[in-house]
Image (spheres, rainbow, N blue to C red):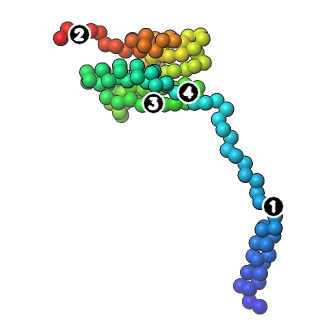
Amino acid sequence: MSEGQSVDHRSNDRDSQVASQAPPQVIPFPSPTTPQVAFQRDELRTIFNLYGRRVAEGEWRDYALDFRRDKAVFSIYRRASEMPLYRIEKDPKLARRQGAYAVIAASGLVMKRGNDLARVIGVLEGPLRAV
C-alpha cells in the first residue's frame, strides 16, 4: 500500500465519525436589549426646514446623522472636511431632568437645552435681515 492510500483511508474514517456525531447547535446572535435612539419624522422635518434655509443662505453645506443606543445626533458642517459647527442631540435619558434636545457648538458649549425641539433649535436661527 502506498502512503497516499493510507491517508485517504484515515480521512474517510474521520469523515464517518464526524457524520455520526450530532449536528452542532446554532446559537442565535443576541438581539440588542435597548432599541436605537432615532429622530422621529416630525423632528427631522423641523431640523431639515432650518437646515434648508441655512443652506439657501450659503452658510451650511453638509450634515451627518448618527444614531447610537443612547442618543441621536444631527451634525451640521460648513464644509465636509471640517469638524461640525453644531450638533443637535436627542438624549431621552435627560428628558425629565434637562430636556431631551440640546444644541452643542463646535467648542462643546451647550447653547440651549430643552424638551421642545423647535425652541431649542431656534438658537441657530440667524438674525432677521433687511432685504
Q: Which of these two is toward me, 95 or 79?
A: 95
Q: Between marks 4 and 2, how big is the CA–CA gap?
A: 37 Å
- At 52% from the left and 30% from the top, the residue drawn is 67
Label 2: how many Cα within 10 Å (few below 14, some 14–19, many 20+) = few
Label 4: how many Cα within 10 Å (few below 14, some 14–19, many 20+) = some
Q: Are marks 3 and 1 in contact (CB under 8 Å)?
A: no
- Label 4 vs 1, first from the N-terminus: 1
Q: Amino acid at mark 3?
A: Leu
SS at circle 4: loop
Residue 55, x across and y down, in percent: 29, 25
Residue tagged by mark 3? 65
Q: Between marks 4 and 3, how big is the CA–CA gap?
A: 12 Å
Q: Amino acid at mark 1?
A: Ala
Q: How many marks?
A: 4
From this view, report whether residue 66 is shown above or below residue 51. Answer: below
Residue tagged by mark 1? 22
Say which of marks 4 and 2 sits in front: 4
Residue tagged by mark 2? 129
Q: Quadrant of residue 42?
A: top left
Q: Are marks 4 and 2 in contact (CB under 8 Å)?
A: no
Residue 27, x across and y down, in percent: 72, 48
Q: Amino acid at mark 4?
A: Val
Q: Between marks 1 and 2, how big is the CA–CA gap?
A: 77 Å
